[in-house]
Amino acid sequence: MAVAHRLFRLFSPWTAEKNNLSSLLIRSLSSSSSHGPSLDPEIDLKEAAAELEKSSSSSPSSSPSKGRNFHWVFLGCPGVGKGTYASRLSTLLGVPHIATGDLVREELSSSGLLSSQLKELVNHGKLVPDEFIISLLSKRLEAGKEKGESGYILDGFPRTVTQAEILEGVINVDLVINLKLKEEALLAKCLGRRICSECGANYNVACIDIKGDDDSSPRMYMPPLLPPPNCESKLITRADDTEEVVKERLRVYNEMTQPVEEFYRKRGKLLEFELPGGIPQSWPRLLRALHLEDDKQSAIA
Ligand code: ADP
């Protein structure tokens, strides 16, 4: 907690009110490259909101096609596979996949006081302060705008109701995909996760085989996803993928992020998707649930 407080102080210009956070996010969501990322409190919120509304008018039931401005969010417990499916959809739909966990890890790899304080939170399975994550996300969106990006698939954001309220205040999220997996598989998947330190690809050495209790809950089998020979010797494990920290991340998810599911459920934006097994089983079903079957020829099998 002490670390969280120090981080709050470091971000003091943005810590006072939620409104300040909103304007920070609005600025990066709405500004053009000529405006730059200043923190001018005189921002015209109405104008920014109107600009954002134009690009977000669909509903979960609509059948999206390539080239639209998707504003999608992936929710789900640690280890469920948000990154895997968000990244595949990003390739399929041609919109960027923005994972706040990746943004945090990039920040961690830089040196300095902030990075070491951040590391303490992340490596203990805690969330980083809302101000901090919104600031990181804003910077990423700003950079994307400059490259001409429109739309995105967010993975790992929002993770608190405050973050969800702020996002909802500045953009109309079209769809929130809530991935679900049996709890016993989540821990095994996090512990089995391996990342190639060179190319960043994700693998998993766990072989998950959970027998169904009865006929209505079938066996779930997820084979390992092993690395190709060129990645084999470069595999690393995330520092927060230890048993103790994963259990804490699951606890924090239930406490802080489950209410976000309810937030979107009430607004009719939540698509619940229970993963039936590994990628070969789950990916085609997810495409069907998203009315994206027509695009599956171009999808990676
Ligand atoms: P997970 O596998 O637990 O879903 P992520 O890779 O998404 O992990 O995130 C790693 C860590 O980064 C989190 O445990 C948390 O400390 C921090 N983090 C990522 N996104 C957020 C967020 N939206 N709010 C607060 N902290 C975040």
Image (spheres, rainbow, N blue to C red):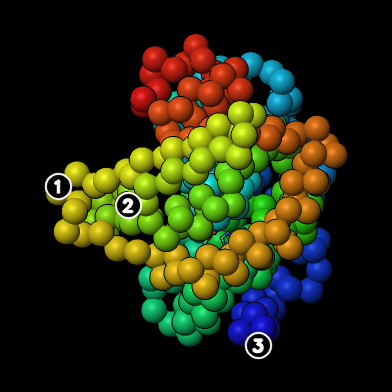
Residue at the disc numbered 1: 229
Residue at the disc numbered 2: 205
In this rendering, the answer to whether 158 lies above or below 178 is: below
Q: Earlier in the sequence, mark 1 or mark 2?
A: 2
The Cα–Cα distance between marks 3 and 1, rounded to whole angstroms, is: 44 Å
Report the disc number at residue 2: 3
Left or right placement of residue 185 versus residue 214 in this view: left
Q: Which residue is farthest front? A: 214
Q: Could you tell me which quadrant the N terminus lies in? A: bottom right
User: Can residue 122 be seen in this snapshot?
Assistant: no
Instruction: Classify mark 2: helix, strand or loop.
Output: loop
In this rendering, the answer to whether 62 lies above or below 40 is: above
In this rendering, the answer to whether 9 lies above or below 301 is: below
Q: Quadrant of residue 6?
A: bottom right
- Residue at 73 percent across and 53 percent down: it is 258
- Give the amino acid type for the residue marked by disc 3 in the picture: Ala
In this rendering, the answer to whether 255 lies above or below 27 is: below
- Give the amino acid type for the residue marked by disc 2 in the picture: Val
Left or right placement of residue 17 versus residue 243 in this view: right
Instruction: Classify mark 3: helix, strand or loop.
Output: helix
The Cα–Cα distance between marks 1 and 2, rounded to whole angstroms, is: 14 Å
Where in the figure is residue 106, as x and y percent of width and height? 42, 64
Q: Could you tell me which quadrant the C terminus lies in? A: top left
- Residue at 48 percent across and 68 percent down: it is 243
Instruction: Classify mark 1: helix, strand or loop.
Output: helix
Q: Quadrant of residue 100?
A: bottom right
Q: Earlier in the sequence, mark 2 or mark 3?
A: 3
Where in the figure is residue 75, as x and y percent of width and height? 63, 46
Label 3, residues with CA under 10 Å away: few <14, some 14-19, many ≥20: few
State the residue in front, 110 or 283: 283
- Give the amino acid type for the residue marked by disc 1 in the picture: Pro
Q: Earlier in the sequence, mark 3 or mark 1?
A: 3
